[in-house]
């Protein structure tokens, strides 16, 4: 621990020695410089007049948005049902696709660690790093607008997430149980069904409910790119500047998210 | 000895116990799930003719991944990615700086009750709203451009980071913090030497993870006019320029992979 002496010869404790302090300051300087450069670029691309005007605009929008148009609610039940379906069916479809990928990606169950595992890992990274809105954009261009495109977007986006968590759960299983089942002379599939699946079942259920909760949130905005659900209503209300309807839709979305989170917490509490 | 007693002695074959032991609940859930599935699938009308027509386009998109076009819209892609990176870095830095005090305030073992409630309310608000919805509202208020995206991601970062930081602080080892307090330290010194060393590794790991999430999110903010690569991507899809879209998606995937790899290294180092 570095110690320096003051003029009287008394020792003073310091957290870091001189070189460490210098290196630390240099790192901070670089960080601040990078941030300031980023800020400058953002600032150049901003019309500051609009920003100074923002409080007035926000107050204006706020006064237009209140009170919410409750009568619009009867047009929202259909889209809300679509949104729920996109999230639920999308999650189910994603699980169907994620399970094989997870088994191929886990070190202890993959048939080939050299050839197949990297492919499975690439599928996981690629589907995970593309946002569900981009998937929806792509699928709307390919198969046309509608709930089906949204459902597939949710499903593809969720593969990577579910498969990643599931393969980590598979890698953490207790090998002695698998060994015990193998010792009874069980076939490969029997080992899978009685040795591995019971061990990962709680994790699997937890992951599916967790992802379903996230998918409820994501499916509420997919309509913005034409993939069905309540986002479509949001988009059209925004385009016609019908702010009371926007308020109502935001309230409905918030309620859906809160209920989804509550359900998922209850189910997870019951499973684990 | 008759055959009956032999059967009785052998017993019946082992059956796998069901997942839910109560039969009424099991069948009730099963039937409810089946009814829901039928209703849900029936309510989705798929235009199969349109899907079949789109399949060739889908195939064109997949093949374009093998010869992506980085060049013909090169300057647009470069500007868009640069803007995305700038938004990501700036919003992550600001988000972390703001979420540290809020995270301290949202930890029940450090903050007094009123502060705790206010900070928890901020966290809940930030987590409940989807980034895209916040971006739409902020674009309406602040106008088009990266500033709206920057503010959106900063706000979203606060909810994520402050919540996890607060949970980490609540789980910390009280003894160390108490030892620092017993030396007669001020409140700042207590936080700095008693609490901060315990949560720092996790804070760094979470910040790296959030940087990764923010980059992914910044790629879609452009769809609603909040700056970044999303606008370019949207235009590419609208014009069916799949090779350009594939190039952009590849850049995003590779960047995310690099970020994930780097954050893995950094997390392994600090923990």
Image: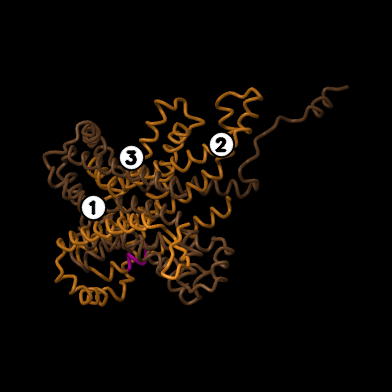
Chain colours: A orange, B brown
Q: Quadrant of residue A195?
A: top right
Residue farthest front in this picture: A8
Dot 3 falls on a residue whose secondary structure is helix
The residue that disc 1 covers is: B84
For this rendering, which residue is in front, A169 or A215? A169
Say yes or no: labels 2 and 1 on the same chain: no
Q: Nearer the viewer, mark 2 or mark 1?
A: 1
Q: CA distance from mark 2 to mark 3?
A: 26 Å
Q: Give the residue drawn at x 46%, y 43%.
A: A165
In the picture, measured across the screen, residue A60 lies left or right of residue B34, that is left
Question: In what element is the residue under mark 1?
Answer: helix
Q: Is residue B47 above or below residue B205?
A: above
A169, B14: nearer the viewer:
A169
Inter-mark Cα distance, 1 to 3: 19 Å
Magenta span contains residue A249: yes
B213 or A235: nearer the viewer: B213
Check disc 1: other Cα within 10 Å, few if <14, some if 14-19, many if 20+.
many
Which residue is under mark 3? Answer: A126
Q: Which residues are magenta?
A: A248-253
């Amino acid at each position: 621990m570095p110690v320096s002496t003051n003029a009287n010869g008394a020792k003073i404790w310091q957290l870091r020695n001189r070189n460490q302090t210098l290196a630390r300051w240099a790192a901070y300087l670089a960080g601040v410089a990078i941030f300031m450069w980023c800020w400058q670029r953002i600032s150049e691309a901003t019309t500051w007049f609009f920003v100074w005007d923002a409080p007035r605009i926000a107050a204006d929008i706020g006064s237009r948005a209140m009170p919410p148009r409750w009568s619009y609610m009867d047009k929202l039940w259909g889209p809300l049902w679509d949104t729920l379906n996109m999230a639920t069916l999308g999650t189910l479809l994603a699980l169907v696709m994620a399970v094989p990928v997870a088994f191929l990606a886990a070190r202890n169950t993959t048939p080939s660690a050299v050839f197949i595992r990297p492919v499975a890992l690439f599928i996981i990274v690629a589907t995970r790093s593309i946002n569900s809105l981009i998937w929806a954009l792509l699928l709307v261009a390919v198969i046309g607008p509608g709930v089906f495109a949204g459902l597939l977007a949710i499903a593809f986006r969720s593969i990577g997430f579910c498969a990643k968590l599931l393969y980590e759960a598979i890698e953490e299983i207790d090998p002695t149980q698998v060994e015990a089942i193998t010792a009874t002379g069980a076939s490969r599939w029997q080992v899978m069904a009685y040795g591995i699946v019971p061990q990962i079942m709680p994790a699997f259920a937890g992951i599916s409910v967790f992802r379903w909760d996230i998918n409820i949130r994501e499916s509420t905005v997919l309509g913005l790119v034409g993939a069905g659900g309540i986002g479509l209503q949001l988009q059209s209300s925004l385009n016609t500047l019908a702010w009371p309807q926007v308020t109502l839709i935001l309230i409905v979305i918030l309620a859906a998210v809160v209920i989804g989170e509550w359900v998922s917490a209850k189910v997870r509490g019951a499973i684990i | 000895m008759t055959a009956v007693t032999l059967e009785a002695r052998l017993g019946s074959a082992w059956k796998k116990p069901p997942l839910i032991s109560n039969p009424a609940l099991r069948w009730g859930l099963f039937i409810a799930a089946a009814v829901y599935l039928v209703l849900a699938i029936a309510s989705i009308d798929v235009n199969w003719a349109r899907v079949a027509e789109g399949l060739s386009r889908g195939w064109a998109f997949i093949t374009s991944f093998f010869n992506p076009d980085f060049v013909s819209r090169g300057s647009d892609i470069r500007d868009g990615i640069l803007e995305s990176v700038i938004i990501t870095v700036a919003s992550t830095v600001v988000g972390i700086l703001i979420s540290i005090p809020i995270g301290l305030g949202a930890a029940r073992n450090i903050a007094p009750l009123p502060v705790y409630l206010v900070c928890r309310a901020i966290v809940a608000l930030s987590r409940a709203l989807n980034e895209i919805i916040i971006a739409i509202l902020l674009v309406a208020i602040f106008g088009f451009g990266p500033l709206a995206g920057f503010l959106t991601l900063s706000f979203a970062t606060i909810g994520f980071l402050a919540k996890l930081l607060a949970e980490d602080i609540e789980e910390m080892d009280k003894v160390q913090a108490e030892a620092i307090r017993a030396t007669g330290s001020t409140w700042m010194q207590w936080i700095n030497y008693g609490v901060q060393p315990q949560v720092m590794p996790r804070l760094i790991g979470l910040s790296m993870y959030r940087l990764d999430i923010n980059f992914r999110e910044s790629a879609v903010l452009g769809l609603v006019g909040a700056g970044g690569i999303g606008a370019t991507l949207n235009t590419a899809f609208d014009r069916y320029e799949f090779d350009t879209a594939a190039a952009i998606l590849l850049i995003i995937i590779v960047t995310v992979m690099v970020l994930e790899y780097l954050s893995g290294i950094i997390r392994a180092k600090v923990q």
